[in-house]
Amino acid sequence: MKMADVCQVFKEAGMEDVSSILASGNIVFSSDKTAEELKIVLEKAMSGHFSYEAFLFVKSKEEVELFWNGIPFEKSDDLHIYAFVGVPGIEDILMEEFQKASQAENEKAEIINSLFYWQVPKGNTLDSTFGKILGKKSLKDRFTSRNTNTFEKILKKMN
């Protein structure tokens, strides 16, 4: 789906200051509603417009800052770092799956502030044992992951 279309759906659902972050599926907007209210309104709007069952994670600027400030790994040109946002407890399930999987050199995982972070060598994200686990149907609507560079772009847009 095109981010311009997604932004339009958010505007029609009453959101203000709507903008997207690249083609990442992240939308920054303003609203006076609570996260719980927003989740209901926006999932219904997205599901109706795009004819699929939308499952969204709505996070405040403060939560995104917490994610950004909690990154436990040093930035490296040879590694990707991902943060996983999801339903409560998903971080423990992901850590359990990570610990069962074989790891590449420098592949690591940590939980900080109930957020699961994963470091993986560039080029190994989809081919790693853990990367393949992430596609499980049983996990599909329980989390989403973003490269930490995306969190940086989101925060810049929020400021």
Image: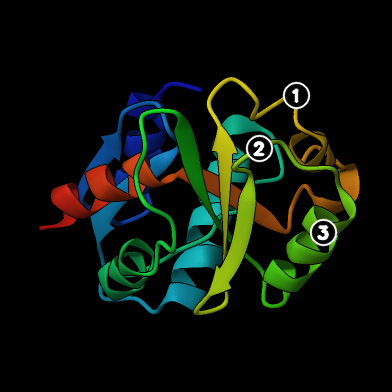
The residues bearing labels 1 and 3 have C-alpha atoms spaced at a distance of 16 Å
Q: In the rendered image, which residue does mark 3 sit on?
A: 99
The residues bearing labels 2 and 3 have C-alpha atoms spaced at a distance of 14 Å
Q: Residue at x 64, y 30 (%)?
A: 125
Taking 78 as reference, is 14 above or below it? below
Asked whether the residues under the numbered discs 1 and 3 touch, taking CB atoms below 8 Å apart as contact, a structural biologist would say: no
**Badge 2 or badge 3: first in the primary sequence:** 3
Residue 17 horizontal/vertical position (percent): 16, 51
Q: Amino acid at mark 1?
A: Asp
Select label 1 or label 2 by which is in front.
2
Q: Secondary structure at mark 3?
A: helix
Q: In the rendered image, which residue does mark 1 sit on?
A: 127
Q: Amino acid at mark 3?
A: Gln
Quadrant where the C terminus lies? Answer: bottom left
Q: In the rendered image, which residue does mark 2 sit on?
A: 105
Q: Residue at x 80, y 37 (%)?
A: 135
Q: Label 3 crowding class (10 Å Cα cut-off): few <14, some 14-19, many 20+? A: few
The residues bearing labels 1 and 2 have C-alpha atoms spaced at a distance of 14 Å
